[in-house]
Image (spheres, helix red, strand yellow):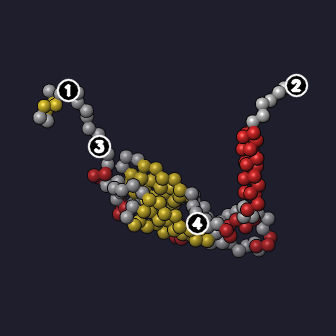
C-alpha cells in the first residue's frame, strides 16, 4: 500500500477547475446558434519588415467588391459583408458555424507609415494590405567607433 500525502489545496484547485468547466458549459451559447450571439470578426496577422508593414486578414466567403479598407491617422479599418446563402432553411441545419453579415476590424498600426501608397490584394479568401514606411521612418544603423572622444573627434 502506498501512502500519499493529503494536499487540500490541490483538491481545492481541481474542484475549482471542474466548477469553471461546468459553468462554461452551462452558460455558453448553443454551438448551433453561436452566430446569433457573437459578431464575426476576421482573424488578422500583422508583421513588420524594414521598409513596410504587412496586414493579412482571413475573409473566407467575402466578395472582394464587398470589402472596404480605410485609414484614419494610424488606424487601419477593414469592413465588409458576407451574404448569407438561403439555400437551406434554418430549421434544417444540424450544425451552423459559418458567419454571415457585416464585419468591421480596426487595427492600430505604428506611426511613420505612408498610407497614401498602401496596396491591397485579395486572393483565396485572404486580404493582404502592404503599407510602406515613410523614408524618414526607416531604421538607420550607425557604426560604433572605439576610442576617446575629444571635442567631437575620436582619437
Front-most of 125 and 13?
13
Residue placed under numbered mark 1 in the picture:
147
The earlier-in-sequence mark between 3 and 2 is 2
What's the CA distance linking mark 2 and mark 1?
Answer: 73 Å
> Considering the numbered disc 3 on the image, is that residue within a helix, a strand or a loop?
loop
Give the Cα separation between the discs numbered 3 and 4.
40 Å
Determine whether label 2 and label 1 are within 8 Å by CB.
Answer: no
Q: Earlier in the sequence, mark 3 or mark 1?
A: 3
CA–CA distance between discs 4 and 2?
64 Å
Q: Position of residue 29 (x, y in %)?
A: 72, 64
Q: How many marks?
A: 4
Contact flag, marks 3 and 2 (Cβ < 8 Å):
no
Which residue is found at the position 35% from the left and 63% from the top?
116
- Camera-side residue: 12 or 78? 12
- The answer for how far apart the CA atoms under marks 3 and 2 are is 70 Å
* Tag shown at residue 55: none
List the residue tagged with mark 3: 140
Few, some or many residues within 10 Å of mark 2 (<14, 14–19, 20+)? few
Residue named by callout 4 = 62
The answer to whether residue 29 is left or right of residue 70 is right
Q: Residue sitting at 67 percent across and 68 percent down?
A: 37
Q: Secondary structure at mark 4?
A: loop
Q: Which residue is mark 2?
A: 1
Instruction: Residue at 72%, 40% (x, y): give it.
Output: 9
Near mark 1 (Cα within 10 A), the count class, few <14, some 14-19 or many ≥20, is few
Amino acid at each position: 500500500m502506498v501512502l500519499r500525502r493529503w494536499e487540500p489545496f490541490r483538491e481545492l484547485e481541481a474542484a475549482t477547475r471542474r466548477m469553471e468547466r461546468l459553468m462554461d458549459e452551462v452558460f455558453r451559447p448553443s454551438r448551433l446558434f453561436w452566430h446569433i450571439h457573437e459578431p464575426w470578426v476576421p482573424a488578422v496577422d500583422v508583421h513588420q519588415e524594414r521598409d513596410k508593414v504587412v496586414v493579412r486578414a482571413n475573409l473566407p466567403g467575402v466578395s472582394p467588391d464587398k470589402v472596404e479598407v480605410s485609414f484614419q491617422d494610424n488606424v487601419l479599418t477593414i469592413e465588409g459583408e458576407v451574404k448569407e446563402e438561403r439555400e437551406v432553411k434554418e430549421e434544417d441545419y444540424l450544425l451552423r458555424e459559418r458567419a454571415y453579415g457585416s464585419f468591421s476590424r480596426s487595427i492600430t498600426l505604428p506611426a511613420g507609415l505612408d498610407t497614401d501608397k498602401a496596396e491591397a490584394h485579395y486572393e483565396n479568401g485572404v486580404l493582404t494590405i502592404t503599407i510602406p514606411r515613410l523614408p524618414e521612418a526607416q531604421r538607420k544603423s550607425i557604426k560604433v567607433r572605439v576610442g576617446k572622444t575629444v571635442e567631437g573627434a575620436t582619437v
